[in-house]
Image (cartoon, rainbow, N blue to C red):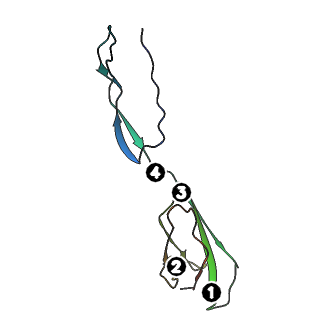
Amino acid sequence: MGGVASLTASNLPVGTDAITAVYVYSGDAENLGSSSNVVIDAVVAAPATTTVLTAAPAAAAGAPIALKATVMGQGSTGTVMFYRKRSRGGPWSALRAPQGPELQLADGRSDGAARPCNRA
């Protein structure tokens, strides 16, 4: 007769891991130690959702507009860039803030604060 051991792990890093179970002989008079087969488990990055809001849907030419991007994800600490595209088409172009188009999310925060951003 055998036994079952179970483990639930939620702290594996993103990547591929080889996983095995090992029975360690510890005084069991009827069984020696043994190792299981190896299984491959892939942990993929959790999806993130980004939304952008503006304080006012229209602004006079040359007037600053305030934008806020919210990133919902697990420990989002990456970079947020704002882009614009003319309503009549054309390519996407980066909006330029005084500190540049990239806004770094602070460690442990899930959203970027509203910052003035001039139209490019």
User: What is the spatial separation of the Cα atoms under label 3 and label 4, in whole angstroms?
Assistant: 9 Å
Label 3: few (<14), some or many (≥20) within 10 Å? few
Label 2: few (<14), some or many (≥20) within 10 Å? few
Instruction: Identify the residue under disc 4.
Output: 45
Label 1: few (<14), some or many (≥20) within 10 Å? some
Instruction: Identify the residue under disc 2.
Output: 90
Instruction: Identify the residue under disc 3.
Output: 48
Q: Are marks 1 and 2 in contact (CB under 8 Å)?
A: no
Q: Please, what secondary structure does the residue beneath circle 3 have?
A: loop
Looking at the picture, how far across and down is residue 40, in whole percent? Answer: 36, 36
Query: Which of pointers 1 and 2 lies earlier in the amino acid sequence?
Result: 1
Label 4: few (<14), some or many (≥20) within 10 Å? few
User: What is the spatial separation of the Cα atoms under label 4 and label 2, in whole angstroms?
Assistant: 32 Å
- Amino acid type at circle 3 is Ala
Instruction: Identify the residue under disc 1.
Output: 64
Looking at the picture, how far across and down is residue 84, in whole percent? Answer: 55, 77
Q: Residue furthest bottom?
A: 62
